Image: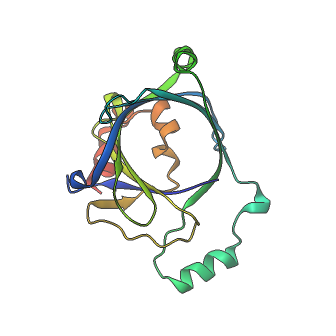
Amino acid sequence: MEIERRFLVVGQGWRPHVRWQARLQQGYLVSGAAGLTLRVRTSEPLTAAGAQAAAWLTLKAPLPPSRLPTPADRAAAQAQQPGLGLALTRLEFEYAIPTADAQSLLELAPHQVHKRRYGLDLAGGDWVLDVFEAGNAPLVVAEVELEAPDQPVTLPPWCGREITGRHELSNAALAAKPLALWSESERQELLAG
């Protein structure tokens, strides 16, 4: 189960929190409007001496209706903590694969994302920050993986607008339609917030 919230990043205040960094390449073999994706990812460590590149094959899917929170559950969470954003919850199946296999699969992936990922030393969940490259630059997104969808999160001041659940800003959607293909007004509206 993957439970996460995502935020646009404003400024450079996150830099003192960096613990590690890696260059990621993600290719989408399957990506559907209903939220099902099959992704191959390679990760090349940039800060750990002697660390090896790694690769994974990941399937993500929406929760079945029987596992979704009810409107009453959402209302109760909002009543307890007004303004609480609920995390996006999905099924996630991830398997380590040989990097040579990943490279072969990346050659088959019609849509790809390239980014630098930074692991952060923030409390309240597993925080990472992605600095997108190529057609998705200058997009910078912070995400936090949580234990529960209604877990409170203390946001650092450099976290801007929340983009949790915005399909057009998912990695799969950005691979298929990078920011460079958005209209100027769409890019300005996104990056201004």
Residue 192 locus on image (x, y percent): 26, 53
Residue 140: x and y in percent read 32, 46
Query: In the displayed image of the protein, which residue is found farthest to the front?
Result: 50
Residue 104 showing in the rendered view? yes
Colouring of the image: rainbow
Looking at this view, is 104 or 83 the one in front? 104
Q: Residue at x 44, y 26 (%)?
A: 53
Residue at point 52% right, 28% down?
A: 55
* Relative to 158, residue 170 above or below: above
Left or right of 49, for residue 37: right
**Is 24 or 80 nearer to us in this picture?**
24
Count the marks.
0
Residue 26 in view here: no
Q: Is residue 153 above or below residue 97?
A: below
Residue in the foreground of this view, choosing between 107 and 161? 107
Examine the rendered structure and indicate whether residue 192 appears above or below residue 67: above
Across and down, in percent, residue 147 comes to 57, 64
Q: Quadrant of the C terminus?
A: bottom left
Q: Splitting the image into 4 quarters, where does residue 67 fall? A: bottom right
Which residue is depicted at the point 62% across and 80% down? 75
Residue that protrudes farthest toward the bottom in the picture? 79
Q: Where is 46 relative to 11, above or below?
A: above
Residue 131 in the image, given as x and y percentages of width and height = 32, 40
